[in-house]
Amino acid sequence: MVASWLDGLSREARKYSGTSVRTLYIGGGTPSVLTLTHWQELMRILHANFGLSSFTEATCEANPNSLTPELLDFLTRNHFTRISLGVQSLNDEELRTLGRIHDSRQALRAMQLVRESSLNLSCDLIFAIPGQTLRTWDYSLRTVMNYAGHISAYQLTLEPETPLARHYDNESLNAEGYSLYRYAQYMLPRHGFTQYEISSFAPDGQECRHNIAYWHQENVIALGSSAVSYLDGVRTANPRTLSAWLDGEEPEREELSPRDRAIELAILSLRTKWGIERSRLLPELEAVIASMPSDLFVITPERIALTQKGMRLGNAVWCEMLGV
Amino acid sequence: MNNIRNFCIIAHIDHGKSTLADRLLESTGTIASRDMKAQILDSLALERERGITIKLVPVRMDYTAKDGHKYILNLIDTPGHVDFAYEVSRSLAACEGALLVVDATQGVEAQTVANAYQAVEQGLEILPVINKIDLPSARPDNAKQEISEVVGIDASDSVLASAKTGEGVSEILERIVRDIPAPKGSPDSPLQALIFDSVYDNYRGVICYVRVINGRIKAGQNIMFMSNGITYPVNEAGVFKPGFTPVNELGPGEVGYITASIKTLAEAQVGDTITDANNPASSPLPGYKKVKSVVFCGFYPVERDNYPQLRDALEKLCLNDSAVTYEPESSEALGFGFRCGFLGLLHMDVVQERLREEYGVELVATSPNVIYEVVKASGEVIEAHRPSDFPDASEITEIREPYIKLSVFMPSEFTGRVMQLVQDKRGTYKSMDYITPERVRLVYEMPLSEFIVDFHDKLKSQTRGYASLDYELIGLRASELVRVDILVNGEAADAFSFICHKDAAYNRGHAVVTKLKELIPSQLFEIPIQASIGRRVIVRVNVKALRKDVLAKCYGGDITRKRKLLEKQKEGKKRMKQIGKVAIPQEAFLAFMQVDTGEK
């Protein structure tokens, strides 16, 4: 199975052969299913097609229960710089509610492992979990802060037909999540973690370069099933199932009009603390922004960015901007 | 002519009018019992369901009395509801006598009195019939006493009957022949025929149901409608056997129908007089008036695309119900529809039901309202249908609204509650009398506008269904009414403004702004919602600003997904009505209109 996946990946990588890349991100379920032999093959494919020597950042996603010292060792030797660990919470009750297979003890052990390596650690945390309190949230944040140099805080989003969705709805979670998110916005910067994007906190200089590429609408090559690439205004989405992708089914292609690109760029850029350059902002969008309450934006002669409050209300702001 | 008897049956709902009519038809052999569908006179589904008659269907019976003579008995059924008071009066005018049917277990009810008085006023001979005497709870003596005391008609000679078992039916037939006078009239005078109903037939055009008072009418004759001077040659004259049966001619005292390829009901209106175009009568029969809508509401198609179907259905429906009026209007919440006028609430329900049943149109109806008369400072008087028709408060000298006289009959234990209910609805006490020690009649005057909004339902629940009511319009009266405007974020939202008594303005204003607060989603800024009279704000609430919106991660593939999600959200917002900077969802308009989707 993995062998044919690697074949597919190799075939797909060849389409982009010769492109030089700056950042690498290996995510999805990949890291936990590959043996070290597979890893070696994967790296060989990547090296063969892309100028990997020039990259500035390489991240590997991992779950606390599948991260091994051997993998860490391999990644270090292969010039990886970051591990993104799906901690989610350090409260066992909350982890059970989320249906995670790891517990807080495994999460702590995994964080400890990464700290003992030379890799930077980024941790994902989830808020608005049913039963979560400000106290348990504070504990998760505080603990993770001791190990990680980067924190991503996501609100729990219920997918339809999942067990949780039967008992809760996004709207009530949204109401619950308000104070928790606000607390993260208050507390993390006091400990050096600046909010540089809606969900991302890090000391200056430790931001995730790879993610910033998305928000700045830079070109991204994505390999594997359900991976989405963006190259010069064209977004291509690979088939969602592994079998369809292996069968070589064509990706879905979406060409953005210059106008849509500009709107999308504005929306994506506004996610970040740097915001958008006013020179690149459509005049209509600037007008919409001017019609909204002024405490949502930081406006300088060169740029427009969201305030903390603006970030909390991002969806509503973008909704207005989509209407132009 | 001496062998003709024209009569009708008047009764309160459920007192057995239709069953008795069926029994008369059966006894006279007009319809064999095996052919009889129960209550054949009530043909509309809604009539059957509610046990009430709306549309008149006359029938002619041949009867050989005990005196050996053959008689023609014409039964003219009357609508059993106050909405159709005018039609009732025209039916009565076509008769010489009336059976007053009273339920032996219930006694006299509100409509019994109203209809009996109308019959007396028209000079009809009243024949009291105490029905349902087969029931164990029957108290015929009490019923007789109530007829004598409450209606004021001698009931000692009443026929005791059971339409269900047939008991007393032959006595009723004999008494009709004996007590109800034969019609009078001259065959040689110029034609005068009263239209007491008219229906529309797809093949024959309008069919006029007529009672000939003087003269004769036959096929080929040129007739004229006296209210409008329109003339037609008669195609066919006939009688109700039942079923349309052509005859050579209709003479004085006779009840029958004519057809003349008349295209619209508006040309042949109930109450009008038909005369001979070549030899017209000097004057029409008394009592004709144009019926006027008193209750209005909006009809909108459930699916906006179905507007043309609704329009066609209304057009067709009006061919056989000329009392319905309609004109196009549009609503922020419901799109295009029609503002329709009716004789009353029941009439409104009937029309709604017919649109649904006969024309397959699914519609929503807005809460009913009335027409106001506004006297302006300039002395000019205008009719106001909607709050937006009202001039600025400073220009108004007086506002008048339609009033009704309301009679409620009920067991005395409910008196207190009903008085409270009527007073809450701005009713003014007129009188109260005990029909029997256990039963009370309350008479109030109250605004029609208060009556048409949920009064029936409240009365029913307050009296567990034991009360009956009757009302009549008594004209316009000055009221201390105000227009309450609703401001959303400082901008007037016309769809939410309403007219009410000044004492109710605060409470209703409060209810509306509170409801809007629930229904208007939080937006980027705080939104004040105010109720005001003129420039004076009487209630204010705030919709708090949004505090947080769902924040999801957004990388690679999420971007398209995210955009689609936002677009969906945006689409939802587009469907909302924008008032100033605020988007108001459709539910808010619907909630305010108290829209009835027809589910009962």
Image: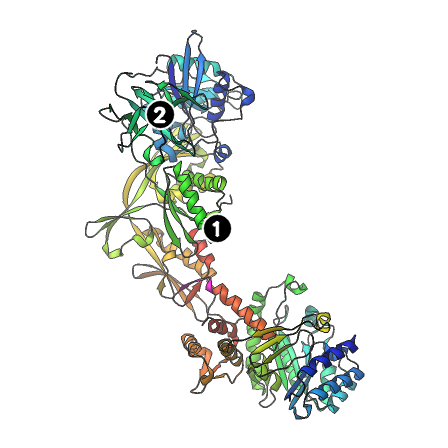
Q: Which mark is residue B13?
A: none
As for residue B577 lying within the magenta part, the answer is yes
Q: Which mark is residue B210?
A: 2
Spatial separation of the CA atoms under disc 2 and disc 1: 40 Å
> Is there one chain holding both mark 2 and mark 1?
yes
A206 left or right of B237? Answer: right
Marks 2 and 1 close (CB-CB < 8 Å): no
Callout 2 secondary element: strand
Q: Is residue B108 visible?
A: yes
Find disc 1 in the rendering and name its residue: B302
**What residue is rendered at 62% in x and 78% in y?**
A229
In the rendered image, the vertical position of residue B192 relative to residue A241, given as above or below: above
Residue A309 pos. (x, y %): 49, 77
Amino acid type, label 2: Val
Q: Quadrant of residue A50?
A: bottom right
Q: Mark 1 lies on which chain?
A: B
As for residue B289 lying within the magenta part, the answer is no
Q: Which chain carries label 2?
A: B
Foreground disc of the pair 2, 1: 2
The tag earlier along the polypeptide, 2 or 1, is 2
Residue B290 pos. (x, y %): 30, 35
Amino acid type, label 1: Val
Is the residue marked by circle 2 packed among few (<14), some (14-19), or many (20+) residues within 10 Å?
A: many
Callout 1 secondary element: loop
Q: Is residue A64 visible?
A: no
Residue stretch rendered in magenta on the structure = B574-580
